[in-house]
Amino acid sequence: MTARTNRLIELDSLRGIAALIVVLHHAYLSLPYLPDWVHWTLDATPLRLIGAGRPAVIFFFVLSGYVLTRALAAQEERQPGSVMNGPAWAGYAAQRAVRLGLPVLASLLVSAALQLLIWEAPLPAETPGLVGVATWAKMWSWKSLTEQALLLSAGNGFQLNPVLWSLVHEWRISLLLPFVLLFRGRLALLMAVALLGAGIARLAGMPEGDVALGSSLLKTFAASAGFLPAFAAGAALALGRVPRLDPAQAWAAGIAVLVMAMAAHDYGVILASVLLILLAQRDGPFAWQMRRPSLVWLGRISFSLYLIHMPLLLAATHLLRDQRVPELAALIAVVLSFPAAALMYRWVEMPAHGLARRLKAPQRRAPVAGASYQAR
């Protein structure tokens, strides 16, 4: 296998678009009254990505599996034996903890501060979407803040920032990715193991195609197993020989992505995500669009955007609760999310990346996570 080490800015852009979809999805959920044609459009067309929201998270998982495995494989190729040993894994885990943990903590502290300033009481039970049923239901405590910062909450426990449910799985499964290198040349076995994980989630009572976070800490591990196929698909793509699509194949892949954007099941989204990654690496019109500076910038701040938008949406909704203008609250939150994400990227995410790079395992010259692509 010949590892490629150039940074793929097209994947940054795709990640930024996925984060934007999540922001728009939560804004959509906060609106109680919309015309039927809007609901139909966001349910029965490729714009279902916004109506459902979940496909964007599945794409995050596939992309993480791809870029992290790609970087680990490149590291192992440069320095054989530098990934598959205890000290190297400990260094990798420490880096991932810093890269993910510091931005997560920052988002929670922002949400906690905003709740202290604004919160008066829970929102009325009829308040739609995540804003009404899963967040700021009561004033936070230091115990709950600590549990959320350590990604140990279950059910609706992420009251300060409900998007952290996905980081629970991102953190756990990313720790397993160094072991994926054992499956080089045996990718079918890798996918079989991942599908067994999905079976475990199903047997544990997780709804098919709707796994999120279990109602107890133990069930959250079963939920994590349910997302193994998404990460494994990305990892398999990184370890295999990436096919170069000819023009006809690229058109077919693009049409398939549009159709599968309407899929209600994770597996269709996983396949669409793999096709998107392939299209982004093909030098053609799609990749050219993904290199636009505005999209590259969006990709750069995408993780911070993903983390900060819900605290802002919560704050705007509670601040304007008496005026009953959810449209205005959603608009304010969406608009403010971009400068807030840019600030968070500059003052939290970038320092976290710098600190992570300094956490080196013994007898290593470079971080396991490589510099080819800065996954969250």
Image (cartoon, rainbow, N blue to C red):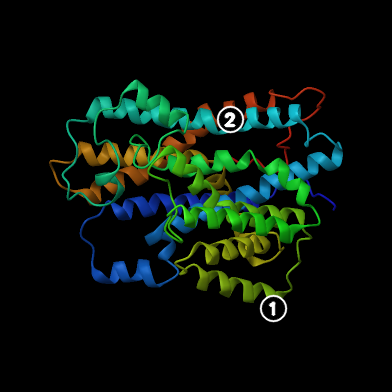
Where does residue 190 sit, x and y in percent of width and height?
Answer: 70, 55
Q: In the rendered structure, find residue 248 and report the number of the disc placed on it.
A: 1
Rendered image quadrant of residue 10:
bottom right
Residue 311 visible in the shown view: yes
Furthest residue toward bottom:
248
Location of residue 68 with respect to 29 vertically, above or below: above
Q: Residue at x 75, y 29 (%)?
A: 86
Q: Nearer the viewer, residue 61 or 24?
A: 61
Q: Residue at x 20, y 60 (%)?
A: 33
Rendered image quadrant of residue 248:
bottom right
Q: In the rendered structure, find residue 317 and report the number of the disc placed on it.
A: none
Q: In the rendered structure, find residue 97 and report the number of the disc placed on it.
A: 2
Location of residue 343 with respect to 210 vertically, above or below: above
Say few, some or many: other residues with alpha carbon within 10 Å of mark 1 (under 14 / 14 to 19 / 20 or more). few
Q: Amino acid at mark 1?
A: Ala
Left or right for 259, reference 52:
right
Where does residue 249 sit, x and y in percent of width and height?
Answer: 69, 75
Q: Amino acid at mark 2?
A: Ala
